[in-house]
Image (spheres, rainbow, N blue to C red):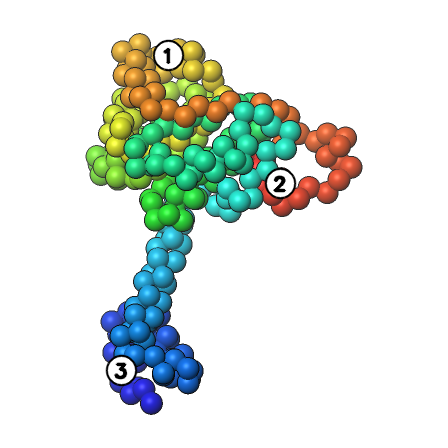
């Protein structure tokens, strides 16, 4: 019989899974035949897995992904060339995060590049890595607010520590000098150390024009392209209705990839 004060102390120490496992063992005669060391190992293992699960939930919440339910397992690239589930899986299972690689996902609107980027980031969170989704067109306003509040330096430091940073809609809309400088700081902090995912429609050869400063553009591209995986997605937009699409009810997986 388990002493109730023992359970109370375990929960006070935030060992909730350990306490639950101990209660379960008390009700399982076969568990009582195990040695003390074996039972203890099972309880510790239960607590560790529980904490890992809670950590994954927290990481996914903090990532602020546009498509939090996107996953490599549910990837559907039917009608899309340039990327498939096998290639996405191979990348996800490689050491791209530890190497600090860049992933460039290009393509027209609606082909699924943002969804694929979210699936990569989601897989990273499931592996215990931190991630954050930022939309580049919103950066100028965010930077103005951060600068006015005096929080810009702290924010840049937080980004530098993120294992995976997703910069979505790169090259959409104009940027000012403050945003150019911030992007260089962000990219420079990550080059060769932290992984970055960029989704874009603007062809790489036009990035200099969009950035608007040749020196800063050279510095940004040099750092981003040190170790880059480039995928160009081509095909029909998942957002555009077609006679074929109208004739059939979309599956959850295909509906989710409409970005």
Q: Which residue lies under the disc numbered 2?
A: 255
> Which picture quadrant has residue 170?
top left
Mark 2 and mark 3 residues within 8 Å of each other at the beta carbon: no
Q: Residue lying at the far bottom in this picture: please name it.
A: 1
Of pointers 3 and 1, the one earlier in the residue sequence = 3
Tell me how far mark 2 sits from mark 3, CA to CA.
50 Å
Q: Which residue lies under the disc numbered 3?
A: 6
Q: How many C-alpha atoms fall within 10 Å of the one at disc 1: few (<14), some, or many (≥20)?
A: some
Q: Which residue lies under the disc numbered 1?
A: 208
Observer-side mark, 3 or 1, equals 3
Tell me how far mark 3 sits from mark 1, CA to CA.
65 Å
Q: Nearer the viewer, residue 111 or 62?
A: 111
Of pointers 2 and 3, the one earlier in the residue sequence = 3
Q: How many C-alpha atoms fall within 10 Å of the one at disc 3: few (<14), some, or many (≥20)?
A: few
Q: How many C-alpha atoms fall within 10 Å of the one at disc 2: few (<14), some, or many (≥20)?
A: few
Q: Residue at x 30, y 32 (%)?
A: 100
């Amino acid at each position: 019989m388990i002493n109730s004060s023992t359970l109370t102390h375990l929960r006070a120490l935030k060992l909730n899974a350990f306490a639950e496992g101990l209660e379960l063992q008390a009700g399982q005669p076969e568990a009582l035949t195990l040695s003390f060391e074996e039972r203890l190992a099972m309880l510790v293992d239960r607590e560790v897995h529980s904490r890992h699960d809670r950590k994954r939930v927290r990481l996914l919440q903090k990532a602020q992904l546009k498509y939090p339910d996107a996953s490599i397992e549910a990837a559907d690239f039917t009608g899309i060339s340039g990327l498939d589930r096998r290639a996405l899986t191979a990348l996800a299972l490689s050491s791209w995060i530890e190497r600090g690689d860049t992933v460039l996902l290009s393509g027209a609107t609606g082909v699924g590049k943002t969804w694929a980027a979210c699936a990569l980031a989601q897989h990273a969170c499931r592996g215990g890595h931190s991630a954050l989704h930022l939309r580049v067109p919103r950066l100028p306003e965010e930077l103005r607010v951060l600068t006015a509040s005096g929080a810009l330096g702290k924010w840049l430091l937080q980004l530098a520590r993120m294992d995976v940073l997703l910069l979505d809609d790169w090259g959409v809309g104009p940027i000012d000098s403050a945003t150019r400088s911030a992007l260089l700081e962000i990219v420079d902090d990550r080059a060769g150390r932290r992984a970055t995912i960029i989704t874009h429609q603007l062809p790489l050869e036009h990035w200099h024009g969009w950035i608007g400063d040749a020196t800063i553009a050279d510095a940004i591209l040099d750092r981003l392209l040190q170790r880059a995986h480039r995928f160009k997605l081509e095909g029909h937009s998942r957002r555009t209705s077609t006679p074929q699409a109208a004739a059939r009810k979309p599956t959850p997986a295909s509906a989710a990839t409409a970005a």
